Image: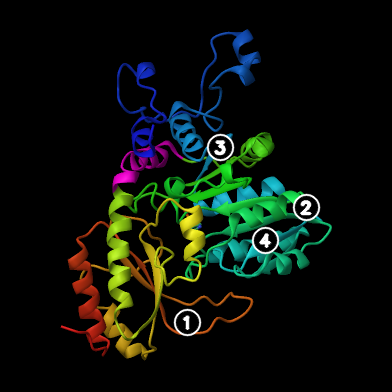
Amino acid sequence: MKKETKLTHLGRMTSEHYGAVNTPIYRASTIVHPTLDHIRRRQTQPYYYGRRATPTIDSFTSAMRELEAAEMSVVCPSGVAALALCFLTVLKAGDHVLVVDTAYDPTQVMAQDFLRKYNIEVDFFAPRETMADLSKRLKPNTRMIMAESPGSLTMELLDIPALVALCKKHDIALAIDNTWATPLFMQPIPMGVDFSIHSATKYIVGHADALLGTVSCNAKWADKLKHTHGLLGITAGPDDITLALRGLRSLAARLEHHQKVGLEIAQWLETLTFVRAVLHPALPSHPDHSLWQRDFAGATGLFTISIDPIDDTHLAAMLDHMQLFAMGYSWGGFESLILPVIPDRKIAPRDGQELLLRLSIGLENSDDLKNDLAEGFRRAGFTLPG
Ligand SMILES: *Cc1c(COP(=O)(O)O)cnc(C)c1O
């Protein structure tokens, strides 16, 4: 079965639910056990306490496990909680972790402000470092690399097979925040990555109305992930999980539009003289385009542009009066977003990135979105053809 067909079938428990197509929302904390023998054998029952599992949770996590080709998937109340769970599954006091300096900002803050408090050593690396340079950062106690590709804000890709080889050689756990690509356009676990993490808040939920995260892993880490998830108790509520499951059903159809319109707008932006760079991995001009071609099955609708610097009055003239593009954190919903971004956590400054605007292309019509941007650029004082 192709992925779009799978998306309509995965996780369904129709025959267990009187023919209902969707698994009902199980609002269950207590699950009662009929006999003494049954409650004594609770660990072998499919359901024995709502924090551990319900049919609602199982419908979603079994779908994610299949999509990620993983051994185990667990659900968390947010993407950030999923990242914390992954760190805590692998690391203990005295360990060393390397984090890519293009990771989602809260991932980097979590590593340096939280993990360090528990005597975990944290270092950062740049996404385009050679494997030889990255090797020099390894220590005898390096236990984990936390990666993200493309990087948040500046969209650098990582050479995942090379990272897998490095990590296997040194017995290091490799985790990837796979939120941008979704499980449809990148499956890290079959490539040898140990953990794939999603902020399901973005494309999986897809409608900007729920927060959710997932961690999936290979057989090597499955027991430890499940155990740590249970210990920390970071499961999610049944309504949010149901919204994510609903989101999965239309994920392929939505991504087709996000990909097509995103690329059309990226190509148009490349023709504008004041646009210095369009940081979109599916464009041949992207420095890591060949990695994208090799490792990804598609591109989603999130990318960044670098434009000629303008003062705040002109920037506000553009951004305060957009008709379709709203300013807001998050992305991956049906609505287009625009955000001025400052990648200030880089270990080495990058050139030509003075004014960056991150665009999340929603489900609107491509010409309408172009017009909205064109009008905005004119308000900012730029000259456009036509
Ligand atoms: C938004 C985001 C997260 C965090 O997700 P929440 O669900 O908001 O906690 C993690 N990683 C990436 C790449 C993100 O964009």
The Cα–Cα distance between marks 3 and 1, rounded to whole angstroms, is 37 Å
Q: Foreground mark, 4 or 2?
A: 2
For label 4, the SS is helix
Circle 4: residue type:
Phe
Q: Earlier in the sequence, mark 1 or mark 4?
A: 4
Residue to which mark 4 is pinned: 114
Residue span colored magenta:
237-253
Q: Foreground mark, 1 or 2?
A: 2
State which quarter of the image contains the C terminus: bottom left
Q: Earlier in the sequence, mark 3 or mark 1?
A: 3
The Cα–Cα distance between marks 1 and 4, rounded to whole angstroms, is 29 Å
Which secondary structure dominates the residues rendered in magenta?
A: helix
Specify few, some or many for label 3: CA neighbours under 10 Å numbering under 14, 14-19, or 20 or more. many
* Residue at screen point 63% across, 8% down: 37
The Cα–Cα distance between marks 4 and 2, rounded to whole angstroms, is 25 Å
Circle 1: residue type:
Gln
The numbered dot on residue 170 is 2
Specify few, some or many for label 1: CA neighbours under 10 Å numbering under 14, 14-19, or 20 or more. some
Residue to which mark 3 is pinned: 70
**Would you identify the image quadrant in which residue 271 lies?**
bottom left
Residue 224 lies in magenta, yes or no? Answer: no
Place of residue 72 in the rendered image (x, y in percent of width and height, measured from the top left)? 58, 35
Residue 250 lies in magenta, yes or no? Answer: yes
For label 2, the SS is helix
Residue to which mark 1 is pinned: 353
Specify few, some or many for label 4: CA neighbours under 10 Å numbering under 14, 14-19, or 20 or more. few
Q: Earlier in the sequence, mark 2 or mark 3?
A: 3
Place of residue 302 in the rendered image (x, y in percent of width and height, measured from the top left)? 38, 63
